[in-house]
């Protein structure tokens, strides 16, 4: 049997959220209340983990989104200023139908799936997140990938007036990431537009972000405005900044340490003070599905 988030979310959290939604309806102003806006439903997926997801509160209050600052609580504090409607994603390069696409064109309600995935940050903490989204492959099929294309490049919105981190040279803005085409087409790779049954919270990368569950979290680029198909391997922001520490592949790998710390174990966010660290799994536990993508590759050299 497949569990959905309401089966596995701690009862108190679930009831609190229902009470909140009910309060919104009683006021007759549900559309004006954050959290009571259009709930999203995603079809349960066989790719979901049976592990218990982190709570909505944990997932939305402990974030990495350097455009809003480097502190884990900065995104929750500052992301409300980001305008996410209207929003469009420019898809171009080696595609048959380049253009400006709306979020609802790329991830229509009737195509949404629920994907409960482990998320493993390169900093050695982890969470379990019930994303709502669509396979990236479905979007690439929509725009028509041309035969010579080998990689997909992504860019986050550049908006220093709303993103205080972008007024400082913390990273080379805009944030950029990339995947090999076969990684991008893999059924585990999604573009997410929500989590639990909420439209994507701004601190998590509204309105549309990448999720690649077998790679370190920094590959899962947020608030995407540009997707480009290319025949050259794109230079990603972290890779450009510190190539000896952050590679293009960034596959979760407990046997290849970060130059400054071990990647063998991880801390599950919210597990409590006395919970032990957990073993990090090869490809973050998705080896059965993705290991063949890297057959014959030296994963120490291609970190
Ligand atoms: N644009 C952008 N995308 C980003 C980041 C960022 O700073 N900017 N941080 C990355 C890192 S390091 C991680 S671990 C994940 C965190 O996603 P979450 O905050 O939704 O858990 O987002 C990734 N995507
Ligand atoms: Mo991360």
Image (cartoon, rainbow, N blue to C red):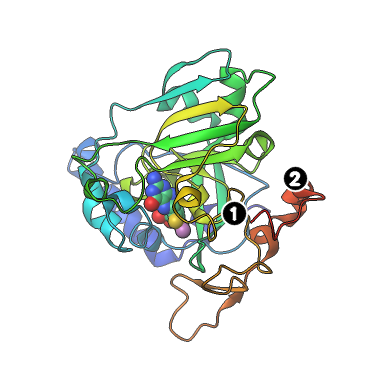
Q: Position of residue 119 (x, y in %)?
A: 53, 58
Residue 44 in sight: yes
Mark 1 or mark 2: whose residue is earlier in sequence: 1
Tell me if mark 2 has few (under 14), some (14-19) or many (20+) residues whose alpha carbon lies within 10 angstroms of its own.
Answer: few
**Camera-side residue: 64 or 3?**
64
Quarter occupied by the N terminus:
bottom right
Residue 196 in sight: no
Residue shown at 52%/48% (left/top)? 219
Tell me if mark 1 has few (under 14), some (14-19) or many (20+) residues whose alpha carbon lies within 10 angstroms of its own.
Answer: many
| 255 to 79, vertically: above or below | below
Q: Position of residue 262 (x, y in %)?
A: 58, 74
Q: Are marks 1 and 2 in contact (CB under 8 Å)?
A: no
Residue shown at 75%/45% (left/top)? 293
Q: CA distance from mark 1 to mark 2?
A: 13 Å
Report the residue marked by disc 1. Answer: 250
**Camera-side residue: 300 or 108?**
300
């Amino acid at each position: 049997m497949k569990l959905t988030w309401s089966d596995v979310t701690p009862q108190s959290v679930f009831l609190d959220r229902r009470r909140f939604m009910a309060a919104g309806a009683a006021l007759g102003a549900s559309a004006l209340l954050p959290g009571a806006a259009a709930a999203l439903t995603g079809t349960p997926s066989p790719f979901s983990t049976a592990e218990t997801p982190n709570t909505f509160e944990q997932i939305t209050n402990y974030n990495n989104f350097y455009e809003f600052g480097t502190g884990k609580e900065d995104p929750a504090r500052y992301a409300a200023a980001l305008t996410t409607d209207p929003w469009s994603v420019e898809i171009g390069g080696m595609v048959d139908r380049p253009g400006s696409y709306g979020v609802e064109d790329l991830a229509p309600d009737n195509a949404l799936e629920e994907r409960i995935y482990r998320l493993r940050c390169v900093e050695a903490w982890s969470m379990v997140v019930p994303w709502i989204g669509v396979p990236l492959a479905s979007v690439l099929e929509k725009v028509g990938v041309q035969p010579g294309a080998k990689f997909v490049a992504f860019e986050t919105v550049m908006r220093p007036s709303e993103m205080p981190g972008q007024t400082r040279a913390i990273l080379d803005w805009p944030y950029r990431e990339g995947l090999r085409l076969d990684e991008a087409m893999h059924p585990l790779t999604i573009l997410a537009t929500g989590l639990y049954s909420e439209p994507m919270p701004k601190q998590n990368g509204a309105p549309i972000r990448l999720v690649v569950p077998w790679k370190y979290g920094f590959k899962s680029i947020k608030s995407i405005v540009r997707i480009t198909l290319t025949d050259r391997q794109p230079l990603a922001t972290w890779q450009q900044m510190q190539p000896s520490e952050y590679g293009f592949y960034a596959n979760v790998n407990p046997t290849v340490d970060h130059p400054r710390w071990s990647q063998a174990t991880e801390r599950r966010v919210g597990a409590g003070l006395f919970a032990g660290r957990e073993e990090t799994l090869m490809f973050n536990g998705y080896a059965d599905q993705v290991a063949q993508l890297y057959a014959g590759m030296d994963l120490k050299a291609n970190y």
